[in-house]
Image: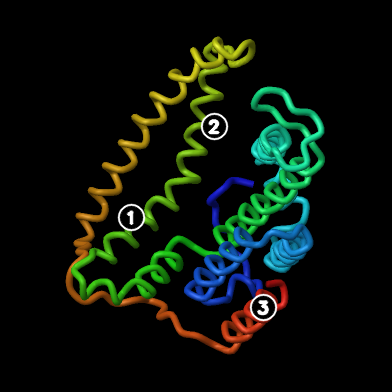
Amino acid sequence: MTFGRYINADSPVHRVDPRAKLVLLLATSIVVISSKGIIVNILFLLLFFLLSSCAGIGLKQSARTLFGFSFFFLLTILFHLIFTKKGAIIDFWIFHLGFTGFVRGIIYSVRLANLVLASTVFILTTSPVELADGVENLLSPLTRLGLPVRDFSLMLMIAMRFIPTMLEDGRRIYNAQLCRGAHFHGGMAERAGMLPSVIVPLIVMSFHHAETLAYAIAARGYRTFGERTHLYRLSFGRLDILAVALSITFIILTM
């Protein structure tokens, strides 16, 4: 699964208003981060797996997404296992090994997995245009303070659209360098020495894409000021109200 690539489908999760999904993502992230029990985090993990299944992402793809972050999960467990003083069995200098640190590392890893899955479901079920419209609508009161909300939403939409493009360009450059005889295997120093052969062309292609996009936007007469029309106007429906009500109920029950 390419991170940041919108999956065009007609699932109940896709049809929920982007503003509702943004608010619920923020609320669930706060609850997940502030929760201290492992049971609450496991319940949220099961909920996100259920949402990904309802959205057509599939449990296998969700598991593959979490596997891509396995290094960070293991690093989190290792840090808490080594540096947690409470309940330490082995104390040596700044290192403290104990069961309490291991359990705490598991809890924080499940929290991180919840944040990854929630963000993945949100990104894959919300198109960049819907995301930009939702952010612009939610932050519209800030325009009275002179903040460029429309510019921010436009930059957010372009950045979201560029994520799959840059990943695809990076894959092509990597394969091209392999065909030219480059070796990306070996020790850490050898791999680091080969990174510029991928990063430098990727940066050059990114600037080229940005310049082409800027010319295309200017040629179409796009302006960030003045009144703007929308092909599809955002509006709350029964499905959005039901999704918000069920989410709030679940959050209250798990607090």
Which residue matches tag 1? Answer: 155
Among the 4 quarters of the image, the one containing residue 115: bottom right
Q: Which label belongs to residue 252?
A: 3
Residue in view at x 57 percent, y 17 percent = 178
Residue in view at x 50 percent, y 45 percent = 164
Distance CA(mark 2)–CA(mark 3): 44 Å
Q: Which label belongs to residue 134?
A: none
Q: Mark 2 or mark 3: which comes first in sequence?
A: 2
Q: Nearer the viewer, residue 248 or 8?
A: 248
Disc 3 residue type? Ile
Disc 2 residue type? Arg
Callout 2: SS: helix
Callout 3: SS: helix
Distance CA(mark 1)–CA(mark 2): 24 Å
Among the 4 quarters of the image, the one containing residue 118: bottom right
Above or below — where is 169 with respect to 236? Answer: above
Which residue matches tag 2? Answer: 171
Distance CA(mark 3)–CA(mark 1): 35 Å
Q: Mark 1 or mark 2: which comes first in sequence?
A: 1
Q: How far from the left and from the top, in percent, is residue 20? A: 52, 76
